Image: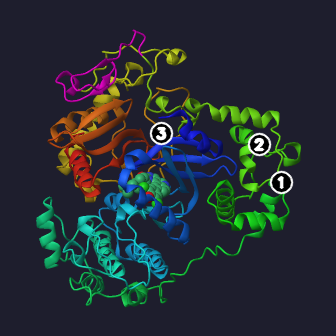
Amino acid sequence: MAAGDYDDLLKYYELYETIGTGGFAKVKLARHVLTGEKVAVKILDKLALGSDLPRIKIEIEAMKNLSHQHICRLYHVLESSKKIFMVMEYCPGGELLDYIVSKARLSEAETRVFFRQILSAVAYVHSKGYAHRDLKPENLLIDEDHNLKLIDFGLCAKPKSDKDCHLHTCCGSPAYAAPELIQGKSYLGSEADVWSMGILLYALLCGFLPFDDDNVMVLYKKITKGKYVVPKWLSIGSTLLLQQMLQVDPKKRISVKHLLNHPWIVQSYLCPVDWQSKYEIGKLDEDCVIELSVYFKRNKQTMEKLISMWKYDQLSATYLLLLAKKDQGKPIRLRLPSAFHEQTSLTPFSEFKLAKHQTESLGAESKPLTPVIRRAAIKKSENKENLCTPMSGVKDEEYFMLPAPKTPVTKKLNEKGILTTPNSRTVPSKEKDQPPKETTVKTSTDSDISTDLVGAVISPERRCHSVELALNQAHMESAQKKKGMGVFGSLERGLDKVITMFTPSKRKGSAGDGPRRLRAHYNVTTTKLVNPDVLLNEIISVLPKKHVEYVQKGYTLKCQTQSDFGKVTMQFELEVCQLSKPDVVGIRRQRLKGDAWVYKRLVEDILSSCKV
Ligand code: H91
């Protein structure tokens, strides 16, 4: 990474951990310094993008034109010689797909809530002359109010002249692609989107796809035939709606307009879907404008003019994030970068003058002078190594860290060329396939964790006492005998019934005193176990059987699968964590790369194979 690439971004944002990857992009969690709001930053490498660069330009243009309550908001676009950064609304609930996976399938009532939101977003996209062309549950995120936000406009199309213009490019994910699209015929983007929404609706109601096959040609055949299984739990109304949406002939397919007030959609709401945007971009919010005028010492009219330019720069981002704060009922206050770190109340602006980067978008009028406190804060942000810290306030490397062994650590390359340390584990390797032995590694105490920060196997200090271990095992054995299944059972029954929010815990003291304490979340599978090490060891013993390679870092297993040709096909994390109320251990799952449904099946398989 060239040092200068992140300079601009780090003037305005604090960067935290990677929350996902997709294509040539990496998505990181970040915090906008002036407002203190969390954001998602999509980081693209121009060189790696190559001929795909125009797609990104299309996505950026589309996101600038689309402003809707169910579409992920774009706040800021930055560009360096090698990178493009897209700063967007952060959706802490993650992907809709993970939510479906966690619940096996959704009830008709819950599906209706979500589906109305999807329909609202898609109708709006179409009204603006666009077609999304890649509608799938991986591209719908859940925000903090449990509302859906549509993402990934990289494949969206806007025919030049009129909306009914036919398209020719076959794109999107095969399982969601309309028959006319995969047959290479010219098609209407809006009709193809209705088909994908039909697949989406089926996935929500059933928990699996109507057309699925590992072989793409077989999959295409199934799609063009249009025959799918109707599970017995589907109501007549749902079955009828699916039938209208999954019509192979696009001319016989229901239109978005008719979907908006379809009897199934309207049921229990008694009103059609309101697809119009609730974000009136033309009308600026007075409170936010006033806060910005005071902060930047500009009169209201000048401020309004500057904001209305919508340059997707620091000013656009600050305005939109202030507005988001207002909508959440938070105070509309801009903070000083230094104050942000200390989480103290704001120092009145008049005591300070602006730093250069904070006035960039304000034109020639400003003659900034940097005060001592601000200068210190900016200096801090220039130190990139210190800035890439996860939300909990610990450094990236520390995030999965355990106390370092007292014995000197020598890093070496394993057979596969992966950098290993005596206390980081990779597979395959016969000896490494074994769960960590309780007595093998001597670890340091909390006071000397800084000596060598490396991943580690579980230390004796961190492991539970053997009595607890034995009790736990005995408890589980009897429970298993009774139920005739492992802790997780089938995904439908076992995979997390508990749905609340997962947030990184306040770490107890220093790194390395046990698994992270997390709140239950749909990405967290709860178990009946109380000993994290039993669970960790069990997962570790199952992974090689499923051809999953992993690197252990503390209680996190960074997993990956490879194709026969050595291409990384899937990356995900399994983290053993401590839950409270009930005080049991859980497994946090996170997909980082790869097909979502293949991931779903693999994780189901791993977890149901765990005999704990
Ligand atoms: N998929 C296509 O995994 C596989 C949390 C999370 C929170 C997000 C906000 C915006 C975006 C992703 C977020 C996110 C890629 C976002 C928006 C647009 C876009 C892309 C990402 C993953 C990448 C990480 C995503 C989900 C999709 C999480 N993600 N957890 N807020 O194009 Cl417009 Cl790539």
Residue 94 in view, yes or no: no
Residues drawn in magenta: 405-433
Q: CA distance from mark 2 to mark 3?
A: 39 Å
Check whether the beta carbons of the residues at disc 2 and disc 3 lie within 8 A of each other: no
Q: Residue furthest top?
A: 407
Bin the neighbour count of mark 3 within 10 Å (Cα to Cα): few under 14, some 14-19, many 20 and up.
many
Q: Main secondary structure of the magenta part?
A: loop
Residue marked by disc 1: 365
Residue at x-position 41% and y-position 24%:
462
Q: Is residue 343 left or right of residue 270?
A: right
Residue 300 image point, x, y percent: 83, 66
Which residue corresponds to the image point at 68% horizontal and 56% vertical from the top-left? 318
| Residue 329 vs residue 298, the one in the foreground | 298
- Give how far across and how far down residue 133 sits, in percent: 35, 71
| Frontmost residue, 535 versus 154 | 154
Other residues around mark 2 within 10 Å, as few (<14) / some (14–19) / many (≥20): some
Residue 158, picture quadrant: bottom left
The residue pinned by badge 3 equals 517
Quadrant assignment, res 168:
bottom left
**How are the colours assigned in the image?**
rainbow
Q: Nearer the viewer, mark 3 or mark 1?
A: 1
Provide the residue designation for mark 2. 355
Quarter of the figure that contains the C terminus: top left
> Is residue 189 among what the camera can see?
yes
Q: Amino acid at mark 1?
A: Glu
Work out whether residue 197 or residue 174 is closer to the camera in this orientation and state it.
174
